[in-house]
């Protein structure tokens, strides 16, 4: 089922031949209410409109970050990663370069129309622009700034706009505008943003609008003609019934009203009668429609999601124009939208084309292209690459407003792992992982390994046939420079429980038994060529939750069985080993009385988290599950975090300079020296999933949200932001 907010809509192309830009027509009278400005509550702190400048966004969540010098590896459930753009923006009409302007914080842009003064009116489904609450309508001025005096609030999607004089006609899937009832259709004054008196409820969502001085044409499941002042139906106009998919395009020109549905027809704008002499080529295709119409005196351009995505037709007969043969291929990943052309704009001999496609003229083009208006040949222009469909392309003042369901530009495709410049956060297009992989990132000088590296021990559920579930895990290896798979280093491991690297050697721990609480464990050692060069048993039975290193030694965390000389249990949850022999270092003995689920090292110190209340035989019931140890296993008394309360299980840890990130704790960011709570890093830093230091000072952090982006009300995304620089 297509989400309600996912609507492909095309802005109306106003006619050149019927005087539709005239300001002389009588306008609807204003309602006595105040201007329809935004009265929404302030945006929540985790709203994507509050993204820190320079943020990098991905189309899935980011779980982990690892910095290696000037490289930052991001790992998660994504396929693309790039600069956050919002769903609309301005590009230079000559060069195609992006121009600074208002950034939509969420949602999609369905439609835009020139304001006649170098700016644009924009409609869609969005709730913030530049961090300011909005309601699906906005005005971008000629200087590319947001007009704060024009922010009408609708309670649903805006999918159609038309401007006549100082009246902006608005159509969509809404029931109220500024708190006043206006079902699917409204008129707003562009002078002061007030709601006008026109009140003509429409039974179905309004998809298209065209306007002349004497008639307002409204497209939904059919076309109706209304008085542009009163909204009363014009009885002399009767259009034929249209396909169940409804009206997708309307335009006026040369004495015709052109209507795009699953076919293209020309109507008499006075009576609605079909002109039989207009007979464009057709090839029936279920669920394929005409979405964009642009009329000139000599050519009618028609964009669709049919096999012929873009045609130039004789506006009188519908016959194809000779020599116009554009090549638009492929389609983007937009859910529910086939490849095709969804909007058009003409600037002299330059035809701007927006839609869902991946190539133009045989060269890469992501959803936006500029073509020769006579031949359809590609005109080389340095355009942004969008990650999803373009719905709106509108010229004004020499620039072009581009809107759609996209939310990132100039992105990089790499499944589950990406590399960024650690200082600028610019994604590296030379690094591409071709196949999805899952796990924790482990780096060596010659490989990036990805595999599960955090476990929680045995299964305590009653009736379980095993204390441990038998399973096989995959360790995947990639070239750290290019992302290319390294088959010689990739392997499957039965009952994998942890892995880490020391120099160019990979240490892999695996459980040898599944039916005892404290099983035997083996560590296999592999060299840079992927050959096993050593193997040893852990000196204590138990379960391993993770492996790491400190000062060149191997560290295994979990819970291990050990007894005193008198036969009493002795608390052991972390052991330190000689990596060459597997012999336990006897001087390291923190006496932790419960399982440790993660342990990370920094400058010879170890941070440990898990389910424990006692370290070095000292009970601390107020602060279970988190401690800081020296490399010799002495507890650091200056590390004194506030009480967590309860028997909380603390899981993943990240240490970045003087910050400690605790995943699972009520306070995620702590001072690594004192344990004191640290304020969020900016934006939704409270919900960060990983934090690393940045080369230029400060930090970079990853976090996740599920905002309304790309026409979907729930889209898990990840982003990486700088902080504290």
Image: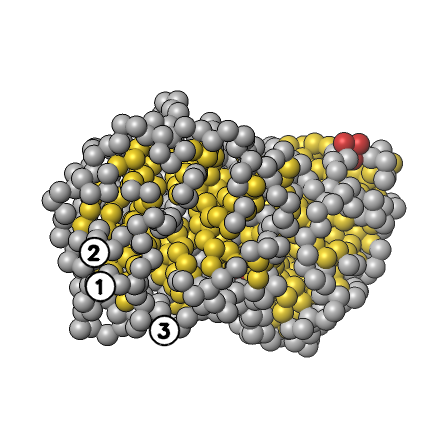
User: Residue 153, relative to residue 363: is it above or below?
Assistant: below
For marks 2 and 1, give the CA distance: 7 Å
Q: Which residue is mark 2?
A: 228
Quarter containing the N terminus: top left
Which disc is residue 27 wearing?
Answer: 1
Front: mark 2 or 3:
2
- The quadrant holding residue 702 is bottom right
- The quadrant holding residue 266 is top left
Q: Residue at x 79, y 38 (%)?
A: 524
Quarter containing the C terminus: bottom right
Circle nearer the N terminus (2, 1): 1
Q: Residues within 10 Å of mark 3 (few under 14, many from 20)?
A: some
Q: Which residue is mark 3?
A: 149
Q: Can you give x and y, in whole percent of width and height, for residue 367 in the image?
A: 53, 43
Residue 668 vs residue 338: left or right?
A: right
Circle nearer the N terminus (2, 3): 3
Which of 4 and 236 lies nearest the eye of the viewer? 236
Residue 480 vs residue 569: left or right?
A: right
Q: Are marks 2 and 1 in contact (CB under 8 Å)?
A: yes
Q: Can you give x and y, in whole percent of width and height, for residue 18 in the image?
A: 30, 50
Q: Are marks 1 and 3 in contact (CB under 8 Å)?
A: no
Circle nearer the N terminus (1, 3): 1
Q: Which colouring convention does the figure follow? A: secondary structure
Q: Is residue 123 visible?
A: yes
Residue 688 vs residue 501: left or right?
A: left
Q: Can you give x and y, in whole percent of width and height, for residue 228 in the image?
A: 20, 56
Q: Secondary structure at mark 1?
A: loop
Q: Residue at x 72, y 71 (%)?
A: 697
For marks 1 and 3, give the CA distance: 21 Å
Q: Secondary structure at mark 2?
A: loop
Q: Secondary structure at mark 3?
A: loop
Q: Residue at x 58, y 70 (%)?
A: 681
């Amino acid at each position: 089922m297509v989400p309600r907010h996912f609507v492909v809509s095309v802005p109306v192309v106003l006619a050149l031949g019927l005087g539709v830009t005239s300001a002389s027509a009588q306008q609807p009278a204003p309602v006595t209410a105040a201007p329809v400005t935004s009265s929404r509550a302030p945006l929540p702190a985790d709203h994507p409109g509050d993204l820190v400048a320079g943020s990098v966004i991905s189309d899935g969540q980011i779980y982990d970050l690892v910095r290696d010098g000037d490289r930052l590896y991001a790992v998660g459930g994504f396929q693309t990663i790039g600069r956050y753009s919002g769903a609309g923006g301005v590009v230079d009409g000559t060069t195609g370069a992006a121009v600074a302007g208002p950034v939509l914080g969420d949602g999609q842009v369905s439609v835009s129309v020139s304001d006649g003064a170098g700016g644009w009116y924009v409609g869609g489904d969005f709730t913030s622009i530049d961090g300011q609450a909005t309601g699906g309508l906005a005005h971008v001025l000629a200087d590319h700034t947001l007009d704060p005096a024009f922010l009408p609030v609708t309670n649903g999607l805006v999918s159609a706009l038309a401007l006549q004089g100082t009246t902006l006609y608005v159509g969509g899937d809404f029931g109220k505008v500024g708190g006043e009832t206006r079902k699917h259709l409204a008129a707003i004054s562009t002078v002061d943003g007030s709601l006008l008196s026109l009140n003509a409820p429409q039974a179905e969502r309004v998809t298209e609008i065209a306007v002349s001085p004497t008639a307002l044409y409204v497209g939904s499941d059919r076309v109706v003609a209304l008085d542009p002042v009163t909204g009363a139906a014009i009885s002399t106009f009767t259009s034929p019934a249209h396909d169940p998919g409804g009206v997708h395009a309307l335009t006026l020109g040369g004495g015709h009203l052109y209507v795009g549905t699953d076919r293209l027809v020309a109507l008499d704008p006075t009576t609605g009668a079909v002109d039989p002499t207009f007979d464009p080529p057709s090839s029936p295709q279920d669920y394929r429609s005409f979405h964009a119409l642009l009329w000139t005196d000599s050519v009618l351009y028609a964009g669709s999601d049919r096999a012929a995505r873009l045609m130039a037709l004789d506006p009188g007969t519908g016959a194809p124009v000779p020599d116009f043969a554009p090549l638009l291929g492929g389609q983007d990943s937009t859910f529910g939208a086939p490849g095709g052309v969804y909007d058009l704009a003409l600037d002299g001999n330059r035809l701007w084309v927006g839609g869902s496609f991946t190539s133009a003229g045989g060269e890469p083009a992501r959803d936006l292209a500029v073509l020769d208006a006579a031949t359809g040949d590609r005109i080389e222009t340095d355009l942004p690459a969008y990650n999803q469909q373009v719905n709106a392309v509108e010229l004004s003042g020499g620039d072009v407003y581009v809107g759609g369901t996209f939310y990132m530009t100039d992105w990089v495709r790499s499944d589950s792992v990406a590399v960024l410049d650690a200082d600028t956060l610019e994604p590296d297009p030379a690094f591409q992982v071709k196949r999805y992989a899952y796990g924790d990132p482990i780096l060596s000088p010659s490989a990036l390994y990805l595999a599960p590296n955090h476990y929680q021990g045995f299964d305590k559920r009653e009736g379980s046939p095993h204390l441990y579930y038998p399973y096989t895990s995959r360790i995947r290896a990639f070239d750290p420079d290019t992302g290319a798979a390294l088959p010689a280093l990739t392997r499957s491991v039965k009952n994998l429980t942890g892995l880490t690297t020391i120099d160019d050697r990979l240490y892999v721990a695996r459980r040898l038994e599944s039916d005892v609480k404290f099983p035997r464990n083996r560590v296999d050692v592999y060299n840079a060529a992927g050959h096993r060069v050593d193997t040893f048993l852990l000196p204590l039975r138990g379960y391993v939750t993770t492996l790491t290193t400190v000062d060149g030694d191997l560290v295994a965390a979990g819970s291990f069985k050990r007894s005193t000389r008198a036969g009493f249990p002795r608390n052991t949850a972390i052991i330190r080993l000689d990596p060459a022999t597997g012999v336990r270092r006897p001087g390291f003995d923190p006496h932790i009385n419960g399982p440790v689920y993660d342990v990370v090292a920094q400058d010879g110190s170890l941070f440990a988290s898990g389910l424990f209340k006692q370290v070095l035989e000292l009970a601390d019931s107020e602060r279970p599950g988190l401690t800081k140890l020296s490399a010799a296993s002495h507890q650091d008394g200056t590390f004194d975090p506030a009480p967590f309360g309860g028997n909380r299980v603390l899981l993943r840890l990240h240490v970045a300079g003087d910050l400690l990130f605790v995943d699972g704790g009520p306070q995620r960011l702590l001072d690594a020296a004192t344990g004191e709570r640290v304020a969020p890093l900016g934006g939704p830093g409270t919900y960060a999933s990983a934090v690393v230091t940045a080369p230029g000072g400060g930090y970079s952090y990853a976090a996740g949200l599920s905002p309304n982006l790309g026409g979907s009300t729930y889209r898990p995304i990840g982003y990486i932001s700088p902080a504290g620089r």
